[in-house]
Amino acid sequence: MQKHFIGGVRPGSIIAQDVYGSDGVLLIKKGSMFREQYIPRFIDAGVQEIFIEDNGNMTPETIASIRKSLNIQDVIHDKTRTHAQSQIKKTMLKFKSVTNADIQRIGQIVEDMIDQLLDKKDFVFALSQLRSVDDYTYQHSVNVGVLALIIGIDLGLEKEQLKQLGMGAILHDIGKIMVPEEIIKKPAKLTAEEFSEVKKHTEYGYEILIQTEIPEEAAKIALHHHEKFDGTGYSRGLKNTKIPLFARIVSVADVYDAMSNDRVYQRKSSPDKVYREITHQGDRHFDTQIMETFARHINIYPTGTGVILNSGHRGIVLYQNKLYPESPIIRVFLPKEKDVRRLYFDLDLSLNTKWHIIDTF
């Protein structure tokens, strides 16, 4: 048990003693999990420090070592990802002067991605790389392109269709270059007027792309990727299959990646929460067939994810159980005082009825 300043407590930590406000009112009980949203409430109640349970043998060094040993690999080559991100950045910084040569270079990158994905017998996408918020748009574009291609391959699209899908997916946000930077990078909720301006990026993107030799099916992704299956999206309010297939695919990939990563105005959600949010929205926001196709290639708890069990133990996901995606094989760490000779044990949650995952960190 250790005392920590409120601002230094990691979300997911276990509170070791009851926490009372300066007025003597119980704020939270011992054994509860600390969450970031508790901080303002504690500060308002005059609480500056709380006691946190020791994580035992699960040190940051141990976690890093295990994750490194798992050798988590990207579904496309690092060189291809870096090249794609660089080319997208160059293209988007040109504003209205995007050329056919730029489009051709994007097309070649997409062909490389397709070839690498088709070489994979079993591809599962996991967002494991770190990114800076400043480069969010470019890295997001690559991720959306990869995800869209994975979905397209599973749906049985022809190679030329995949190329069009990938090009449009990578360039789906190109219209944002026409939106004032202070709005795009505003670290707070947008006003109604600002959001109205942001929504124009779909029209701007289509207008930019349609001036090039990119196929119209690809250009329409920029225009329609914020449409929703129930008709509540923008910019045209299209419903169901009135939304072009490629845009329906990219809308799922776009929302998944956006929720999975830090943005200037919002912190990322954990992999399991993103998975459940996407699948819960189902036929309201997404084409059900596409959403289900997508879900087959996304792990609820990706390998390397830190998890917290209902027993209070912490662990790291080692392997997946394809038949039981909510019950992976994990390495569970023991408190130091339990047994100095045994630091951890491996547990297949699909074979255990008592323990289950309640949160991630």
Image (cartoon, rainbow, N blue to C red):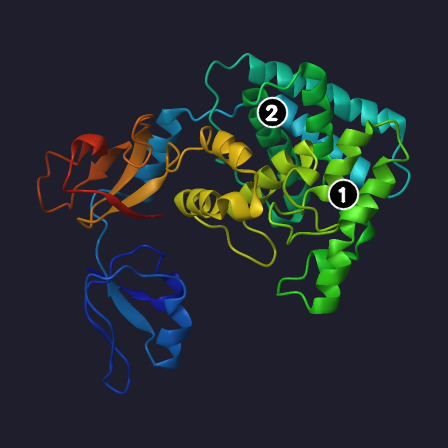
N-term-proximal mark, 1 vs 2: 2
Q: Position of residue 19 (x, y in %)?
A: 24, 73
Q: Position of residue 192 (x, y in %)?
A: 70, 68
Circle 1 is placed at which residue position?
223
Pick whichever, 168 or 63, lies toward us: 168
How crowded pointer 2 is (Cα within 10 Å; few <14, some 14-19, many 20+) is rated as many
Question: Would you say 177 lies left or right of 110 here?
Answer: right
Pick whichever, 83 or 320, lies toward us: 320
Circle 2 is placed at which residue position?
152
* SS at circle 2: helix
Look at 10% across and 47% down and name the residue there.
337
Asked if one can make out residue 169 in the rendered structure from this viewpoint, the answer is: yes
Q: Quadrant of the N terminus?
A: bottom left
Pick whichever, 238 or 101, lies toward us: 238
Is 212 situated above or below 28? above
Question: Would you say 93 lies left or right of 184 here?
Answer: right
Q: Place residue 39 in its image quadrant.
A: bottom left
Q: Place residue 167 in its image quadrant.
A: top right
- Per the model, the C-alpha gap separating discs 1 and 2 is 19 Å
Q: Which amino acid lies under the numbered mark 1 shown in the image of this protein?
A: Leu
Asked if one can make out residue 126 in the rendered structure from this viewpoint, the answer is: no
Look at 74% across and 34% down and name the residue there.
88
Question: Would you say 49 lies left or right of 233 here?
Answer: left
Q: Place residue 137 in its image quadrant.
A: top right
Look at 37% across and 37% down and name the residue there.
301
Question: Would you say 179 lies left or right of 96 here?
Answer: left
* SS at circle 1: helix
